[in-house]
Image (cartoon, rainbow, N blue to C red):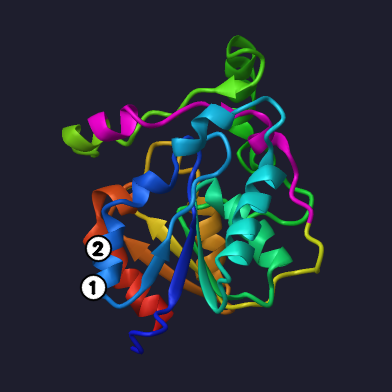
């Protein structure tokens, strides 16, 4: 790989999280010869002080589009993790000339007009009720998977913050029609009882236009299985 121009991976992170959650991945991806860019959405991570009730899915798509523009990123391998699949889909739609491939990691894969709550209907009532008790708009974090090491649970819990409900109930609007770029899905096989992402994995596995991969990890392999995830990303990018 040309050290002067490493392939760029741009991460659209999950809900309640931020760029910091990919800390373990940076040295591993660097050693592999890649550039890993992990910005935080408005209202999360080091930008938590900017949180307000009107932040929605489009706000986070715009965050990522601005990173692409101001960092002059191109030929991007775009990663969407969990909620970040919603964001990455919008980014790939609006920056088609900048994104070379799209990788979903245990993520939502929306079609035009769908919100996250449309894709996760069983969670709708609970999230809406939580938002009512959280200043009318704040949704507190979901629990971490049971197999997350205690040290990581402590690290995560100290940094995860509430999400605006509008991020979950805003429908995505695709501006350029169906996405035609190469897409891959990574399914974390240590599933929670709800198995929120199994339906998206099943579709990808059965569609020859997708690349399909599995990882022996729970929902956030960037935290619990960073070496295995790095190896898998290398394989897909190659």
Q: Residue furthest bottom?
A: 2
Residue 76: image location, x then y, percent: 53, 73
Number of disc labels: 2
Task: Look at 71% across and 65% down and name the residue there.
Answer: 93
**From the viewer's perspective, is residue 35 above or below residue 61?**
below
Circles 1 and 2: CB atoms closer than 8 Å: yes
**From the viewer's perspective, is residue 206 above or below residue 5?**
above
Task: Look at 68% across and 34% down and name the residue there.
Answer: 55
Residue 203 seen in the figure: yes
Residue 214: image location, x then y, percent: 36, 64
* Membership of 167 in magenta stretch: yes
**From the viewer's perspective, is residue 93 above or below residue 80?**
below
Residue 157: image location, x then y, percent: 32, 28
Residue 216 seen in the figure: no
Residue 39 appears left or right of 3: right
**Element type at mark 1:** helix
Residue assigned mark 1: 31
Task: Look at 57% across and 17% down and name the residue there.
Answer: 130
Considering the image in quadrants, where does the C terminus appear? bottom left
* Membership of 198 in magenta stretch: no
Residue 18: image location, x then y, percent: 45, 43
Viewer-closest of 166 and 144: 166
Viewer-closest of 31 and 79: 31
Badge 2 density bin: few <14, some 14–19, many ≥20, Cα 10 Å: few
**Element type at mark 2:** helix
Residue 153 appears left or right of 12: left
Residue assigned mark 2: 27
Specify start and end residues of the magenta stretch as a single range.
Answer: 154-173
């Amino acid at each position: 790989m040309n050290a002067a121009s490493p392939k760029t991976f741009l991460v659209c992170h999950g809900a309640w999280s931020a760029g910091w959650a990919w800390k373990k991945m940076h040295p591993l991806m660097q050693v592999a010869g890649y550039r890993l860019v992990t910005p935080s959405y408005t209202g999360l991570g080091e930008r938590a002080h900017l949180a307000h009730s009107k932040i929605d899915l489009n706000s986070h798509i715009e965050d990522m589009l601005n990173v692409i523009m101001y960092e002059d990123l191109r030929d991007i391998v775009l990663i969407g993790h969990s909620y970040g699949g919603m964001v990455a889909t919008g980014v790939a739609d609006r920056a088609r000339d900048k994104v070379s491939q799209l990788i979903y990691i245990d993520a939502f894969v929306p079609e035009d007009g769908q919100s996250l709550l449309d894709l996760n209907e069983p969670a709708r009532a609970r999230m809406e009720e939580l938002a009512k008790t959280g200043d009318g708009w704040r949704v507190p974090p979901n629990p971490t998977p049971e197999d997350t090491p205690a040290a990581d649970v402590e690290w995560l819990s100290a940094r995860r913050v509430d999400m605006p409900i509008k991020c979950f109930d805003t429908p995505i609007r695709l501006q350029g029609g169906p996405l035609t770029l190469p897409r891959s899905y990574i399914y974390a096989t240590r599933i929670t009882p709800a198995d929120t992402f199994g339906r998206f994995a099943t579709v990808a596995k059965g569609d020859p236009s997708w690349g399909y991969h599995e990882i022996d990890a729970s929902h956030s392999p960037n935290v619990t299985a960073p070496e295995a995830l790095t190896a898998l990303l290398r394989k897909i990018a190659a």
